[in-house]
Image: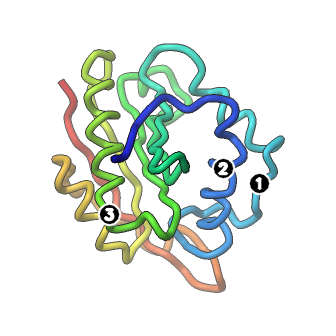
Amino acid sequence: MTEVRDAVGADLPVLTSIYNHYVEHSPATFDIEPFTVDTRRAWFHQYAGPGPYRLLVAVDDGEVVGYASSSRFRPKAAYDPSVEVTVYLRPHAIGGGIGSVLYERLFAELRAQPVHRAYAAITQPNPASVALHRRFGFEDVGTMSEVGRKFDQWWDVLMMQRALP
């Protein structure tokens, strides 16, 4: 049984490891240099306290196997009613429904927040991520073509959005 809970400071090393897998092996993130736990601390601390910026972890048999977050969409105040959401899983946890479990809890928590829209930016191709977001009511907004360059290749990013009550 997968447990979903708020991330705590002790989770930072494993969260960094999960993310670094995608930095090093996937275009899912456009970061190109792995992080250390220390360089990832500022990212982690943006989720401190109550509010619309959430960081949840999935724990399966005592192991953190993934996380979901809602982050500030853009740094200008008029964007504050919007969040960007994402899910990252350990490779062995992909396809087991953990992303859905994380998003169910994340969106349940966001219902109590003054959030109007959630956005997801998905590097293409990524049919599994697109399918996950569609299951949660996301619709395509548009595709930014060749917006990022990683692994000596140009990548498109599909923008998706969903309304939040």
Q: Quadrant of residue 11?
A: top right
Q: Nearer the viewer, residue 52 or 97?
A: 97
Image height check: is 163 above or below 60? above
Q: Secondary structure at mark 1?
A: loop
From the top left corner, tell me how far across and down residue 141 is, in percent. 25, 54
Residue at image mark 1 = 35
Q: What residue sits 65% from the left and 82% below the top?
A: 151
Disc 2 to disc 3: CB gap under 8 Å: no
Q: Secondary structure at mark 2?
A: helix
Q: Which mark is residue 164?
A: none
Q: Quadrant of residue 107?
A: top left
107 sits left or right of 43 in the view: left
- Cα gap from disc 1 to disc 2, whole angstroms: 12 Å
**Few, some or many C-alpha atoms within 10 Å of disc 1 (few <14, some 14-19, many ≥20)?**
some
Kind of residue sitting beneath label 3: Gly
Question: Which tag is nearer the camera, tag 1 or tag 2?
Answer: 2
From the top left corner, tell me how far across and down residue 16 is, in percent. 68, 51
Residue at image mark 3 = 96
Q: What residue sits 43% from the left and 72% below the top?
A: 156
32 sits left or right of 136 in the view: right
From the top left corner, tell me how far across and down residue 144 is, in percent. 40, 65
**Few, some or many C-alpha atoms within 10 Å of disc 2 (few <14, some 14-19, many ≥20)?**
some
**Few, some or many C-alpha atoms within 10 Å of disc 3 (few <14, some 14-19, many ≥20)?**
few
Kind of residue sitting beneath label 1: Phe
Q: Which mark is residue 14?
A: 2
